[in-house]
Amino acid sequence: MKKIFGRTFAVVAATLVFTAAVQAASRNSANLLQYVPSDAPYVIASTEPMPAKLLDKLEPKVDEMLKAYQRVLRHVMAEQLVKMAEDENGAKDAEKFRAVAEEFMGLLSIEGLRNAGIARDSAFAIYGNGTIPVLRFELSDTALFDATINRFEKQAEAPLAIGEVGGDAYKFIDAGEVHFIIATLDEQAILTVVPATFDESQVAIALGIQKPKNSLSKSKTLQGISKQYGFSNHMTGYFDIQRIAQMFMGPASDFDQGVFDAFEYSQPVLSESCRSEITQMAGIAPRMVFGYSKVSVDAVESLMVVELRKDLAQGLATVPSAVPGLGHDPGGFMSFGMGLNILALRNFYEARLDAIEADPYQCEMFADIQDGAARGREALNQPLPPVVYSFRGFVANITDIKGLDMASQTPPESIDASLLVAIENAESLVMMAAMMDPQIAAMNLVADGRPVRLELAQLAEVADDAFAALSNDSVAVSIGAGAESNSAKMLVADSTSPAPLLSMSMDSARYYNMMGDAMAAEKTSDSDHEVSPAMREAMRDIMRLSGSMYERMTVDVRLTERGVEIGGRMKLSN
């Protein structure tokens, strides 16, 4: 039963994280953050209630999705029960597993979560208490949560072990070297894992009974991140790469040393050069931060930033190139593209090689990087055609696609799409192509932005119309409905600022429906692992429900003087 409880513990934690991420809210965030050390290596936290109208809109769909997951898990459970029943005395264990699984699946609904004392405005935080991971969330009713755990114990016929710290009791699963702790303290639930050798004082630190001297509620670290990056307080988090490197490089805190001792882990003996260079390496990308930048009943916008050392960020900021239309959502089924100044990328890479050669790594751990500098220099010395450095990027817009069946790998019957390639002196490139292909020469395509009909047999198979248009720095090709006007419009589309490195947008509902239909129709070739039709239908429904929540999704990757910025926008369905 320990294995059953251990697996259930992990799944319950994942479910709570998923639900919290969707509903993220807070009734008393300051009370929650006082338990989180200010030097926590990572934190994901909610500190402000989500708009009530947004939750009213999302909750019914989340409820449907959770129930669809129930169906999937029931199929998985049925397969597991068959396997367990085949073992000696397996029938009894199988029945216990079934009872525990049924109890867990009762949590997979909005009503089930409410009956477990988890309100829709329950705040949560996932963080590292040193090397110990902790999930902490508020409860609307501690008695309801405790009753839920008691039902798990009863169904498994295996009461959890009881521990005590300073008069406060907690339950735990004894998994040998570690204890999975489930505690309810201060109207909060705490799920964590600690070494079995931890004494009472160490468990007190892990559970927050002994509060940190310096906490996030005092340090205002999350508030500082929110202010710097324009995050709302609905969701904010970070991973401190330098802190994580320092934890394992040493010296360790007394608490972390207790964890290392329990698992007989010894911190590496490092030379001064290695210690210094590892610290410098961690400083390349010292921190990753993320959060919601805008939340409304219509859309949710998010941002993740991998902060970079200033000189690297400034160098990489020159690499993206402006491309007409890149970074805008044109509507339709899907759009994607990139803007890349290859010469700027080469110059950045060359500057990195210069830095490595001027100040070689002394630590043996970075010998491969040092050796790679010589190989990188050889690669740079290889000549490239000038046209490579003229390339600036591309944008592909798929307005509509019909007849595509991903499950049977049936190609589309028709496509309405456009492709723009940005390149310096595009007219010269077309002239070179015309010298090698009579069909291109016959088009008489000139850099005046006017559409010219394309007569290509390959395109005729999927579209009735095909047009091309040319400007001084771009060539556009459009096929299908509206091809003539679309080819000209692409050339004069606005560029966004700052220019993205990568950009993508899509019709989420249509995409997820396509993926769901493909999953429902797909059959495995291995008869021993054939997925039942009912299972495939349940997986299809999950995909469709995901699509029903979001109307459109956009993602942009930018290289700025702050670092690598990944911005996303989910336009919610009505």
Image: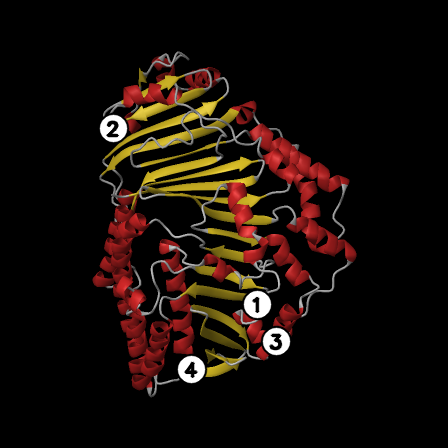
First in sequence, mark 3 or 1: give its number: 1
Does residue 114 appear anywhere in the picture? Answer: yes
For badge 2, the amino acid type reads Ala
Residue 570 position, x and y percent, is 35, 43
Residue 486 position, x and y percent, is 31, 22
Quick one: which residue is furthest to the bottom in this view?
89
Q: Are marks 3 and 2 in contact (CB under 8 Å)?
A: no
Of marks 4 and 1, the one in the foreground: 1
Residue 364 position, x and y percent, is 73, 55
What residue is rendered at 48% in x and 74% in y?
180
Q: Which quarter of the rendering shows the N terminus?
A: bottom left
Q: What's the distance in space between the residues labelled 3 and 4, CA to CA? A: 22 Å
Q: How is the image coloured?
A: secondary structure
Q: What's the distance in space between the residues labelled 3 and 2, CA to CA? A: 66 Å
**Label 1 CA crowd tier, 10 Å (few <14, some 14–19, many 20+):** some
First in sequence, mark 2 or 1: give its number: 1
What mark, if any, has residue 262 been given in the picture? 3
Residue 289 position, x and y percent, is 53, 48
Q: Secondary structure at mark 2?
A: loop
For badge 3, the amino acid type reads Ala
Q: What's the distance in space between the residues labelled 4 and 1, CA to CA? A: 26 Å
Q: What's the distance in space between the residues labelled 4 and 2, CA to CA? A: 66 Å
Closest to the observer: 223 or 413?
Answer: 223
